[in-house]
Amino acid sequence: MKYTLSMAKENWLQIEFEFQPTKVGRVKIGLPIWRPGRYQVQNFAKNIPEIKAFQGDKKILIQKVELSSWEIEVLEQAPIKLVYSYYAVQRDAGGSVANGQMLYINFINCLLCPKGFENQDCTVAIKFPKAWKFATSLTYKNPFFIASSYRELVDSPFLAAPQIHSFTWKNSGINFFLEGIGPATIFNEKLIASYQKIVAYQLAWMGASPIKKYHFLLWICPEPFYHGVEHTQSTMMVMGPEDRECYDDLIGLASHEFFHVWNIATIRPKPLLPYRYGEITYFETAWIVEGVTTYLGDWFLKASGVISEEEYLHLLLGNIKLHFDRDRFSAQSLTESSMDLWLDGYGPSTPGKRVSIYFKGAIVALGLDLMIQQKFNGARSLKDIMQRLNARFGNLKSGYVQSDFFSIAEEVYEAPLTDFWDLWVLGSGDLLEPLASILRLSGLALSESPTLGLQLSKIANT
């Protein structure tokens, strides 16, 4: 499949797509309705005003048949070319932007694919000023960017601009890149050194890596912003505004997104293996994908020496507060709220209904981790669960379900955890006292006062 992209005018991508049909008759062409990392329908097709189809010089009929699907009546097995434009103004880590300052593309927003062609190799020609620099995890063979499949292509964001700051290093045979646009002062030695420590610790902690290269792509934008999206070989992070000190946010976001290399990109819930971009895909383990990653993302900062223990406890209390201040008495369980991401999205929902898969999920991960450490005097931890999950389901061997996670956790704990699952994951009861009890055994006091709210402190002589 061959794609050519250019910026015809401000805010618009001009796209040509050529493919070889495998049969005559009706061929369905689709655009994803959602993207990995955000499990809600986004309907990118709303940004395409029209599509024209050709075989050779002859214009052929293309008809809209669903919100994000079209059909072509193929009369002969000759190459088909589709020509269309895409309105690229979505300024976040999952969107696309085309203007005189930058060309930023998440291909999943804008590239069509015939049904059944998801595993075909792709070439992409992208036209931008010769003086500009670019950054992407895609292989570049002048003048094309190469992907082994449509799946790899839409998992590989692209960034081009007049200036891109770029730094590289190597760890465990993996080539790492920090590349981005924004003030040069942001891309300083302190940030690079922290990224190197985070990466090194996570690689050692998991013990096996599914990647040979990884790109931290960063856009420091003028507006207040904090957003990151995970990909198998990269992450796109958008942070702003340009004049604020954002080091703390940049290390936290990078740690979270890098752990997604394992926890979703290559250890994947069964309903998401493979991704079916054209349909809603319900799964009840979003709390494992995001909650475990939220907890570990912060913990890796302390464990790798990037932040102090005091700073880590501040982060931990922040996540705890985000659950108890917002969702403490919400009606749904974690599994129910995981399923309802597709219904409620990520913004405000019905009061008292859902819990955050990020913050309550992180509390579950914290509680589980500490229970295991306490039983085995630190000799076992959540690391053992994630390593076993990786050994059995990693590298997209097969997808896991919630009962697989429960089973592996109980193997590590060497006892049933039915009561824990029933209360913390499958139920909606108040977790303040159960969490405080577990923290107390690890030397931490979680208290609540009418004036100060929740407080977390170390217990003396522990």
Image: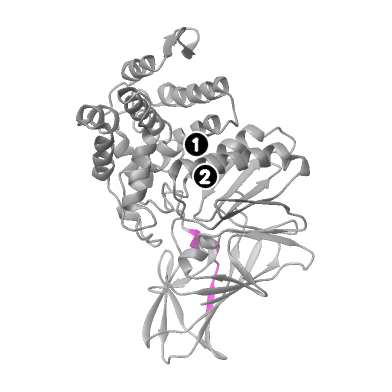
Residue at position x 26%, y 45% from top? 404
Is residue 350 visible in the rendered image? The answer is no
- Closer-to-camera residue (148/275): 148
Look at the picture and state if 321 lies above or below 209: above
Q: Is residue 165 left or right of residue 20?
A: right
Task: Say what secondary structure mark 2 lies in.
Answer: helix
**Badge 2 amino acid:** Glu
The spot of residue 405 in percent (x, y) is 29, 42
Q: Please say if 442 is above or below 71.
A: above
Element type where label 1 sits in the image: helix
- Residue shown at 42%/11% (left/top)? 447
The x and y percentages for residue 107 are 55, 63
- Return the residue nearer the eye: 336 or 165: 165
Task: Give the magenta-colored segment's residue range.
Answer: 44-52
Instruction: Assign the C terminus to one quadrant of the image.
Output: top left
Q: Position of residue 35 (x, y in %)?
A: 46, 55
199 or 37: which is nearer to us?
199
Badge count:
2
Q: Is residue 102 left or right of 389 when viewed as pictured? A: right
In the picture of the structure, the residue carrying the numbered disc 2 is 257
Q: Amino acid at mark 1?
A: Gly
Q: Residue at x 42, y 40 (%)?
A: 290
With respect to residue 22, does 368 lie above or below?
Answer: above
Mark 1 = which residue?
A: 297
